[in-house]
Image (cartoon, rainbow, N blue to C red):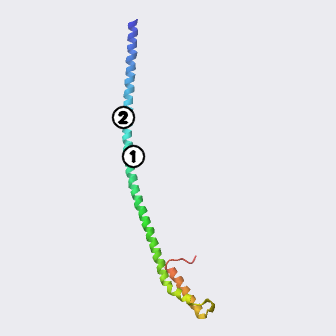
Amino acid sequence: MQNANTLEAMEVTRQLILVLKGTVESLQMNLSQERDDNEGLKLTIESLEDENARLQEELFKVQAGAVEEKDTAKENQAEAIEAIGEKLAFYYKDMKRIDPKKLTAEDGETLYNILDYTFKALKKAGVKMEK
């Protein structure tokens, strides 16, 4: 009887060992699959990091260009204002010579011509006055 119990225990142990071997094989396959997945993810991460670095460099270049364009636009605007000022300086001096308390018809004509020239110069510089 003891022999039968021992044989039965050995059979149960053998089956348990087989089940455990199957479990180990399954876990090894799962581990191998996870390692493969991790390698794929590492490659994806590297690719995304490279893309991120490239895009950051491109963004830096675009921002640098935008700053340069803005500076150039400010310089151009300042130059345009200065040019208008130079064109109108002569007429401004003429206008300042006129005494507003003693306006004559000739002074009125001069003021009209000054305003006419001023608005033409502003229009030519790109200032929109009509809506």
Is 41 placed above or below 13 here? Answer: below
The residue under the point 38% across, 35% down is: 33
On screen, 21 above or below 77?
Answer: above
Q: Earlier in the sequence, mark 1 or mark 2?
A: 2
The mark tally for this picture is: 2
For image coordinates 44% across by 73% down, the residue present is 75
Instruction: Tell which of 105 and 35 is nearer to you.
Output: 105
Q: CA distance from mark 1 to mark 2?
A: 20 Å
Q: Name the residue tied to disc 2.
A: 32
Res. 56 image quadrant: bottom left
> Which residue in the structure is indicated by mark 1?
45
- Quadrant housing residue 116: bottom right
Q: Position of residue 26 (x, y in %)?
A: 38, 29
Query: Which residue is more in the foreground, 48 or 89?
Result: 89
Element type where label 1 sits in the image: helix
Decide if residue 6 is on the left or right side of residue 110: left
Amino acid at the residue labelled 2: Ser
- Residue type marked 1: Ile
Q: Could you say where residue 18 lies in the image, as x and y percent from the top left?
A: 37, 21
